């Protein structure tokens, strides 16, 4: 489970063995037992939420959007 970024108490990561065939590029975000999944392509959007409240999700959407290029690059480097 490669961790790409740790920021503001959140851990941004992806699972190395997730999906066969592999899903499109995405990132998981976890904090204190809550986890969300964001698609990075074709456009950044929330795919799943398990435990984050609406204000936290808005904060996470901003963070993922701001760091989208870095997250996408880490995905590409790992899986290609």
Image (spheres, grey):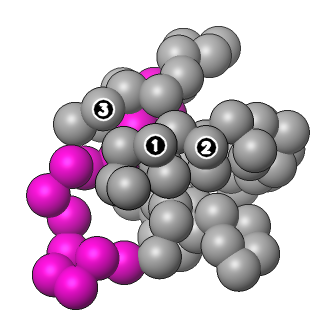
* Residue 56 visible (yes or no): no
2 and 59: which is toward the camera: 2
Dot 2 falls on a residue whose secondary structure is: helix
Task: Report the magenta residues as a range.
Answer: 11-23
Q: Quadrant of the C terminus?
A: bottom left
How crowded is the residue under tag 2: few (<14 C-alpha within 10 Å), some, or many (20+)?
A: few
Structural distance between the alpha carbons of marks 2 and 1: 6 Å
Q: Quadrant of the N terminus?
A: top left
Tell me whether the residue at label 2 lies in contact with that at label 1, contact meaning CB atoms closer than 8 angstroms: yes
Q: Earlier in the sequence, mark 3 or mark 2?
A: 3
Q: Picture coordinates of residue 14 (x, y %)?
A: 35, 47
Structural distance between the alpha carbons of marks 3 and 1: 11 Å
Q: Earlier in the sequence, mark 3 or mark 1?
A: 3
Q: Is residue 21 left or right of residue 44?
A: left
How crowded is the residue under tag 3: few (<14 C-alpha within 10 Å), some, or many (20+)?
A: few
The correct choice, above or below, for 10 with respect to 69 in the image is above
């Amino acid at each position: 489970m490669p961790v790409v970024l740790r920021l503001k108490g959140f851990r941004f990561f992806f699972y190395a063995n997730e999906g066969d065939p592999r899903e499109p590029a995405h990132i998981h975000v976890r904090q204190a037992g809550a986890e969300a999944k964001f698609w990075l392509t074709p456009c950044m959007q929330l795919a799943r939420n398990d435990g984050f409240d609406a204000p936290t999700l808005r904060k996470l959407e901003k963070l993922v959007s701001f760091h989208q290029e870095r997250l996408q690059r880490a995905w590409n480097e790992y899986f290609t």
